[in-house]
Image: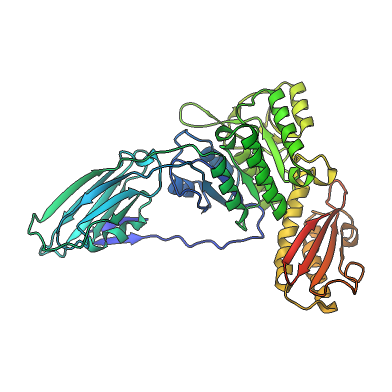
Amino acid sequence: MTTDALPGVSLTFVPRAAEVEPLRTDVAAFLGRFRRGPVATPVRVESWNDVVGAFGVPDGSSAAPYALRGFFENGGRRAWVLRVAGPSATAGALWTVGDRAGFAHTAYRVVATSPGAWANGCRVLIRYQGSTLAGPPTVTVRVLVAGEPVETFAGLPPAEVAAGLTASRLIRVVPVGPAPGAREQGPISLSWDLVLAGGADAPPGQAEYLGAVRTQADLPEPALVALPDLGGDVTGAEHTEVVLELLASAAAALDRLAVLDVPPGLSAVDDAVAWVRTLAAAGDTALLRAAAVYHPPLRVPDGREPRTVPACGHVLGVIARLDGERGAHHTPANAVLMDAVDLAVEFPEPQQVRLFESGVDLVRCTRGRGLLVWGGRTLAADPRGRYVAHRRLVHLLVRAFRRVATPLVFDVNSPELRLALVRALTSVLLAAFQAGALAGARPEQAFRVVCDDTNNPPEQDPAQVVCEVEVAPAVPMEFVRLRLVLGQDRGLEVIEA
């Protein structure tokens, strides 16, 4: 961001880019609608101020901004955001300068930094000061958009006005006219008052959400995923297809959890239960253990009147906070939710039981403690994939295994390679055992690593190494088996048995 200090002097603050950390399991990805910001392009944010700077203040038209705010208010520290939008147009206005001294072009087009109706009515005030005894020509630009901080760019050289405004969060200046001819001997100073128009929004559909799901699948950091606006934008069979595509990508990666919301049109318990059953019938165990559903929606502060938003963002914030405080293997159940004042609907106990038995994790309001996350189960019926804490432990181990095993992909299959692989994986598992993530009084009771002739017989492809890992999560004591296949022709593959 550039701010004016003294005439002809500007200060530019460029934050240092944070390094990508694939080992983290507290990073979330949010796919949804926002007031402004790049479309279908992942943006990393590390605070609510980052969200407002990149995507604008919430305007009440979508749930995603409020879900993101809930994520950070509940202890989340980093998220990737993908703005999902249908076909839309970008607001703009023509700026004609003519053969004015100092400009590189005779005309420019001032456009909003991102598509949407948010920039309609944006005023761009431009003042040109010609050459005087005080110095060469300069341009000062002020950008005014309702609900946004005023931006001021002072002392820009006319020939560099397009480059100077790349620091703006709101507008860009694009040359459209030819180079000036004979210089005009006009007034020493001139002013333009431009108003941007032509911006338009369109709600996203199934195709846009599927594209966003595939984009997030390629990001190495996120271990948690939410789509706060999906239920309001896509319904019926198309909604189910998007959810299944998301779960398929999460199950294939074996390193992330999708936190889902019951679509807003299904407020009745019978409808919510039927929706969960539809998902369960359409997906297999591998897909269902990659998803957890939290319900009901929350009431969150928003000016004078609270607003109803899905619970996914707040729950992800709790999961991320517990990850940092205690480790990925801790369940989010019984944790207090912040940035929420009430539940959108209070279910009687028999209806709560029905929701719980169908696989829905509840958010409850309890006397003396407020709003609590009341459940930590996935949609899977299989006990090995039922618990969010166990799935998160698997995600952590898979990420760590990739970190230590990937550098060995092109090594020659030999006893030395197998020993190096066993040592590397054992170090990861010992750290998990010492953190209390695994059961047993001794490491040999908590995990096993097998990489010898029993799973690598002599007749096996010499370009492939198989390593089997069994771990016993702390509670309940059920073994989870992971199979690592190290192949020179296909890299590292992690399979859950």
Relative to 167, is 238 on the left or the right? Answer: right
Q: Quadrant of the N terminus?
A: bottom left
Q: Answer whether residue 327 is visible to the viewer in this image.
A: no
Q: Quadrant of the C terminus?
A: bottom right
> Which residue is painted at 83% across and 50% down in the image?
474
Where residue 456 appears, x then y in whole percent?
88, 70
Relative to 400, is 304 on the left or the right? Answer: left
Please name whichever residue, 354 or 492, is drawn nearer the observer in this view of the structure.
Answer: 492
**Please, is residue 188 above or below residue 410 in the view?**
above
The answer to which image quadrant residue 154 occupies is: bottom left
Relative to 189, is 312 on the left or the right? Answer: right
According to the image, what is the colour scheme of the structure? rainbow
**Please, is residue 362 above or below residue 104 in the view?**
above
Please name whichever residue, 299 or 287, is drawn nearer the observer in this view of the structure.
Answer: 287
**Please, is residue 35 above or below residue 391 in the view?**
above
Relative to 125, is 129 on the left or the right? Answer: left
Q: Answer whether residue 101 is visible to the viewer in this image.
A: yes
What is the number of callouts on the image? Answer: 0
Where residue 352 appears, x then y in whole percent?
74, 26
Where residue 348 appears, x then y in whole percent?
72, 21
Please name whichever residue, 319 or 189, is drawn nearer the observer in this view of the structure.
Answer: 189
Where residue 368 appears, x then y in whole percent?
68, 29
> Which residue is painted at 12% across and 54% down in the image?
189
Taking the view exactly as shown, the residue that stands out farthest to the right is 454
> Which residue is painted at 40% across and 45% down in the image?
115
